[in-house]
Amino acid sequence: MITLEQKREIAQACIDYATANGWVSDKTTGVNQMATFTKVNVMYVSHILRFDFTYKDSKTGENKEIAERWFRQLAECIGMKLQKEYWPHVDTPQYNAIDLELRESLATSATRVLICESGSGKTYTVDRFKKEFPNRVFVITCHRYDTVNDLIDKMAEAMGRTAEGKSIGRRLTILNVWLYTQGRFDGSKPVIIFDEAENLTLSTFQALKAMYDTINWSCAIVLIGTDQLINTMERLKNKNKQGMPQFYRRFKAGIRYITPMDRDFNVFLADKPFPVAFKNTIRSLCENYGELHDFLVPAMREADEMGVPFTERFFRMKYQLPIKD
């Protein structure tokens, strides 16, 4: 349940966020930009930024409360915490390395191919980076079954643009021109990030090569994925697939291998008041940071809700592990 006071805090935080990102000026209120960024209906955003938490139902004419889920979505998008935080931010070596590469890419419009282990926090890092630069960072999550048109649709949605046209070339050109234009002004050069890029296919690689040739040094292109991404790129290059040797050459200098994770998870567990045996149990179950989060956070939240201590016994009971005497 979100209280009235929390709604006011969310509204003020949204205003502050819009102001900090230059969305508020003499001629604009930041409503449209905030709605595009958060994917919350512009009417709701307009009311909330005026501290009016109701709207008029177009069918009945009645004033109704704006649903709580829209407040939660706004808060999540701008990085505002509404509940107890069970997984506070940690500057892991992987986070620091990925964040540094993203910042350098944004500043210089240089390409990057970041190779990270699964579960090392790459998507988490990208999400935080996007919240810091919402006007300049556009994130696309790749899927194995994405066609080139699917990828263009995702890029257009991320940029808040439309890319209409009968041909792939025409649609891609519309987005490329906009990115190129944005990149002509200092302090506004964008970066387009393709997360889970190991899912890219030959046709989508070819589309990215076409993008690179148009927006090079005006907009950075960053691919982030596991070692499967490099394996796929090298395999297609070695088979001399159309355009892949050229694609590989353009991105080769930007390849960076992110340091492997510490499987002892000391960066997360060192300050936890858990007995050594409990920490070792957790280590035996988890292979990466993502799994560590998925095991610990639900269990800690459930213990809080039940009003009981978070112990190894509770943890084992929740996950139906053998109970130690």
Image (cartoon, helix red, strand yellow):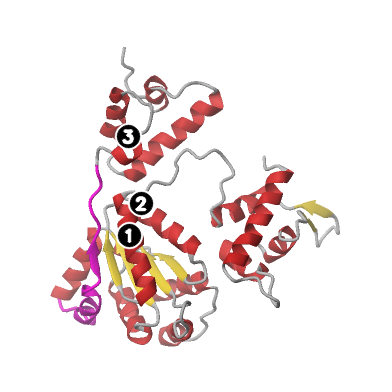
Q: CA distance from mark 3 to mark 1?
A: 23 Å
Secondary element at image label 3: loop
Residue 24 point in image, percent of width and height: 65, 71
Number of the front mark, 2 or 3: 3
> Pointer 3: what residue?
270
Number of the front mark, 2 or 1: 1
| Other-residue count near label 3 (Cα within 10 Å), few / some / many at <14 / 14–19 / ≥20 | few
| Mark number displayed over residue 98 | 1
Question: Which amino acid does the dot numbered 1 rest on?
Answer: Ile
Question: Which amino acid does the dot numbered 2 rest on?
Answer: Gly
Q: Pointer 2 and pointer 1: residues touching (CB < 8 Å)?
A: yes
Question: Which amino acid does the dot numbered 3 rest on?
Answer: Ala
Residue 248 is covered by the magenta coloring: yes
Q: Nearer the viewer, residue 65 or 23?
A: 23
Secondary element at image label 2: loop
Residue at 35% x, 51% y: name it. Answer: 121
**Side of 74 where 157 appears, left or right:** left
Q: Quadrant of the N terminus?
A: top right
Residue 233 point in image, percent of width and height: 22, 70
Tally the numbered discs.
3
For the magenta stretch, what is the residue range? 239-262
| Among the 4 quarters of the image, the one containing residue 184 | bottom left
